[in-house]
Image (tube, rainbow, N blue to C red):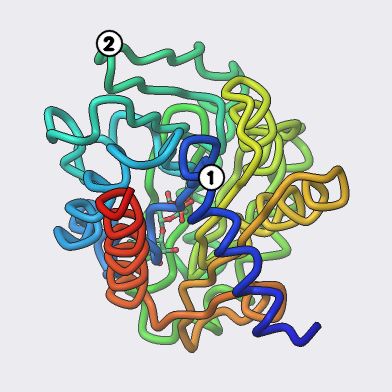
Amino acid sequence: MTSDALAQTRLQAVLEHPGETLVGIDFDGTLAPIVADPEQAHADPRAVAALARLGNLLGTVAIVTGRPARTAVRLGGFRGVPGLGHLVVLGQYGVERWDAATDEFVIPPDPGQVAALEQEIPPLLDRLGQGAAHVEHKGRAVVVHTRQLPDPDASYAALSGPLNDLAERHEMVVEPGKNVLEIRSPGIDKGVALRAIVEETGARQVVFVGDDLGDLPAFRLVEQLRREGRGGLLVCSASHEEDALSVLADVVVEGPSGVATWLEQLADALETRRDAR
Ligand SMILES: O=P(O)(O)OC[C@H]1O[C@H](O[C@H]2O[C@H](CO)[C@@H](O)[C@H](O)[C@H]2O)[C@H](O)[C@@H](O)[C@@H]1O
């Protein structure tokens, strides 16, 4: 079968079994455009509207993000949206959770070593001539951004080794991303998070939509689920910044606006089938 035919077959399985389908979707670069200030990364309203339609059609819709769950809920504008009454947000790579149905957050305490590690970051950045880098504090993780620096790629290269060494000394790991080096605890990733919600919901078809290296474990998990006999469809939100996911994807769309269009088309197709019954 050609890859196009395979993608079509995988989509068809979703269309035929929406009630047993889980859609997992990343936030930054997928639902929200990449912008310089992480506090200004709001979800595309078209994507949120499409997710609300899908919330009435599919078994489960879950946001799986590196953002803290509270931040994702706020920047996504997900609270109180009709159709998103059962949305699940898995934040900080699955450590945190928000359920729209109860409006409850489950947020474990921050790991103790983060505070000590954070204190070392400003002098380290200064020593490396990168003192203007934006530092995002996420409680259980800390993120150094190079996007707003004069040469983001050179700064990224200069910071990568020293931040990895710092993380290692504090028994943490670096999650690389688009102009970001995020220091966080090991042991959980989006693949682990996605596996847990797939088992919890009993989903037989899993769609995952992502754009960056942090989404790779979720892509790998969907490949694994296929080997275990479940259906899986992978959608890449493509950009010039990262191409690791496009080779694995069944569907490649152009950034968050392409994702919004793809979600709208999925909702259209599912509604047409529902109305024809
Ligand atoms: O798992 P995600 O939802 O993709 O979150 C991963 C990281 O995304 C954020 O950074 C990215 O988006 C920023 C806003 O558009 C952009 O400025 C940055 O360059 C991107 O890498 C976020 O700030 C991090 O905390 C997340 O870990």
**Badge 2: few (under 14), some or many (20 or more) residues near its Cα, within 10 Å?**
few
Q: How many numbered discs?
A: 2
In this picture, residue 94 sits left or right of residue 130:
right
The three-letter code of the residue at mark 2 reads: Thr
**Badge 1: few (under 14), some or many (20 or more) residues near its Cα, within 10 Å?**
some
Quarter of the image for the N terminus: give it.
Answer: bottom right
In this picture, residue 9 sits left or right of residue 102:
right
Q: Is residue 72 visible?
A: no
Name the residue: 36% across, 77% down: 149
Beta carbon at label 1 within 8 Å of ligand 1: no
Q: Quick check: 128 above or below 171?
A: below
State the image quarter where residue 3 is shown. bottom right
Element under label 2?
loop
**Badge 2 is on which residue?**
102
**Badge 1 is on which residue?**
17
The three-letter code of the residue at mark 1 reads: His
Quick check: which quadrant has ligand 1?
bottom left
In this picture, residue 37 sits left or right of residue 159:
left
Name the residue: 47% across, 24% down: 96
**Cα distance in 3D space between marks 1 and 2:** 26 Å
Q: Nearer the viewer, mark 1 or mark 2?
A: 1
Q: Position of residue 130 (x, y in %)?
A: 46, 68
Which numbered circle lies on residue 81?
A: none
Q: Position of residue 2 (x, y in %)?
A: 76, 87
Q: Are marks 1 and 2 in contact (CB under 8 Å)?
A: no
Q: Is residue 125 visible?
A: yes
Name the residue: 43% across, 28% down: 139
Q: Quick check: 251 above or below 183?
A: below
In this picture, residue 178 sits left or right of residue 217:
left
Q: Quick check: 48 above or below 101?
A: below
State the image quarter where residue 106 is shown. top left
